[in-house]
Amino acid sequence: MKLASIDNGSRDGQLVVVSKDLTRYCAADNIAPTLQAALDEWEKIAPRLELLYRDVEHETVPCLRFREHAALSPLPRAYQWADGSAYLNHVELVRQARGAEVPESFYSDPLMYQGGSDDFLPPRADIPLGHPDWGCDMEGEIACITDDVPMGTTSQQAADHIKLLMLVNDVSLRGLIPGELAKGFGFYQSKPATAFSPVAVTPDELGDAWQGNVIHLPLMVDYNGQAFGRADVAADATFTLADLVSHAARTRNLGAGAIIGSGTISNKDEGGGPGRPVDQGGVGYSCLAELRTIETIRDGEAATPFLQPGDVVRIEMRDKAGHSIFGAIEQTVTAPPEGLR
Amino acid sequence: MKLASIDNGSRDGQLVVVSKDLTRYCAADNIAPTLQAALDEWEKIAPRLELLYRDVEHETVPCLRFREHAALSPLPRAYQWADGSAYLNHVELVRQARGAEVPESFYSDPLMYQGGSDDFLPPRADIPLGHPDWGCDMEGEIACITDDVPMGTTSQQAADHIKLLMLVNDVSLRGLIPGELAKGFGFYQSKPATAFSPVAVTPDELGDAWQGNVIHLPLMVDYNGQAFGRADVAADATFTLADLVSHAARTRNLGAGAIIGSGTISNKDEGGGPGRPVDQGGVGYSCLAELRTIETIRDGEAATPFLQPGDVVRIEMRDKAGHSIFGAIEQTVTAPPEGLR
């Protein structure tokens, strides 16, 4: 089934069930007021939402027209947002650019950072940029939402805790990252508000494309209307979403509604070299930093600038028939307001 | 006023108003069902809670006996938990132990990490330890809860956004920290579930002890029934809670109910040297790691072990008349269950 949170002026939105083709929706707040409330009692609530989804598909309940612009992030705020880095190709390129090796442990022990989850951007909301020098970048990713995950859950056990899937724009401020990582405490200011796709879907919606706790489809990242990334989510994934959920739950429980992300999707080129742009026959990139890294390796310096005010980023995924699965994240970067630091 | 969340079997508990002496409470869920709900509309809700608090103080409403054991953390789960490191004395000692200098920027740019906020421990709950080698440690701290804080809020403006204060046990797994920090993404597995004091209080409850956005009282940390730390929260605080809130909001909004912590309270000894134990006339320590660091500097190696199963940590703060302000965090470390990794 497909679920969304419609902007009704409240902090958590109104839970609705969306038709498979994303054209219609029916309010579900008589079943659970919000998506978080549904996740809090998922075993009890999900079957009732599935029944409503069937009715929406059969058009046996009154529906309204679904507009992606009216959707908040499926969880407009969440109690947990942790983002892995499952695509080591990206890490390898970054390290290669500065002449460093990737530690062997990175291939068995996932990188993961704790993100801010109290104020997600809606999928069509502007990205507020405080200062152009902050080096704003998109990061196209996928993420899952879990139910309660007990401490010590294995990767195999974690698979059953993956209840919903979404797309992510993990907005990053590249200009602030080096200084922040040098302090040793990880990302904080360099990871501002994140946006998720208008719709969250149960894994069964992906059919054959959901195998081994990875999505076997390309993530479509467009930059100012041009195809920028078409990287296959399954190719070159060192870790599955289940691996990342297990990593997150090693020393503590995860609460229902925890969001665990994949990190920036990144493919090697055929033959194992750095990826080529889409217009040169490659699958491109899911963030600007990767292209800039490749430029640095090749030319000695990066030519592609980071996101500027007015730039538009679009992140979407389509099934094999070309239909949008999650709806599209589409965000415009806005200039800093007067007087902001 | 003083607020708590009583364990009623729900995830977020029942909001109650607690008497100043912590002996009585009155349910407030007719005003707001949970503390988060109150914070979501604080301007409207807080005055009504204050009226109820006055009635509780005057005993003009029926009250029940308040038991700290029945309280969850005031926010049993939260949308944001970010912990600063305002006490550079601690950082200086750690660096001195390994022969490194503290960068000058640390005195103007706070260290802060993003913590997991989906599953806080109740203040009297056991600390589940997955493996003794994880090097479990307490960290005695204070924290504030904010309302909505817009991106770019200055330190001066941030003061008005501090709505409630709490004590914290920021449980840390010292054995996992070096490996995790070496990966460059900051803390994740090394920061398991945190516990907060049974009661959250508005800053006015502290009277003269709340000045300059810092609490001017000692934090009492007891370890297995012995006084271990009596560090003054105001002494040696390089940053105030308002500074830390401003830092957290530099590149993004903070949502209502955001929890921002001070980091481990740490005082220099008289004369500026490393602190002495309480039983030697010093103010002691708010975590074991600081004592271990001092032992390392003095003796070449640490003698004090980390927390072992059965150890008890108690964190409390008393006003000048000796009355507990927030109630006590008191937690016992438990051995790993069979079969846990």
Image (tube, coloured by chain):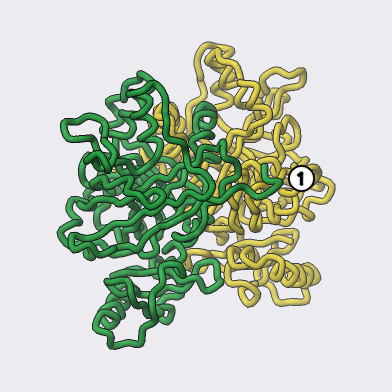
Chain colours: A green, B yellow
Q: Nearer the viewer, residue B107 or B190?
A: B107
On screen, residue B7 versus residue A97, left or right, reads right
What amino acid is at disc 1?
A: Gln
Can the viewer see residue B228? no
Residue A66, above or below B70:
below
Question: Residue at horizontal 28%, vertical 63%?
Answer: A325
Look at 59% across and 52% down and name the residue there. B253
Q: Which quarter of the figure is the C terminus of chain A placed in?
A: top right
- Residue identifier under label 1: B156
Q: Quadrant of residue A256?
A: bottom left
Report the residue at 53% width, 55% height from top: A118
Chain letter of disc 1 in the image: B
Q: Does A266 sit left or right of A312 as displayed?
A: left
Image quadrant holding the N terminus of chain A, namely bottom left
Q: Looking at this view, is B28 or B339 the one in front? A: B28
**Side of A59 relative to A137 (left or right):** left
Which of A8 and B63 lies nearest the eye of the viewer? A8
Residue A126 image offset from top left, x and y in percent: 52, 56
Tell me if residue B35 comes above or below residue B115 in the rendering. Answer: below
> Residue A88 location in percent, x, y?
29, 34
Mark 1, other Cα within 10 Å: few <14 / some 14–19 / many ≥20: few
User: Taking A119 as reference, is A270 above or below it?
Assistant: above
Residue at disc 1, secondary structure = helix
The x, y position of residue B29, in whole percent, is 61, 73
Q: Nearer the viewer, residue B248 or B128?
A: B248
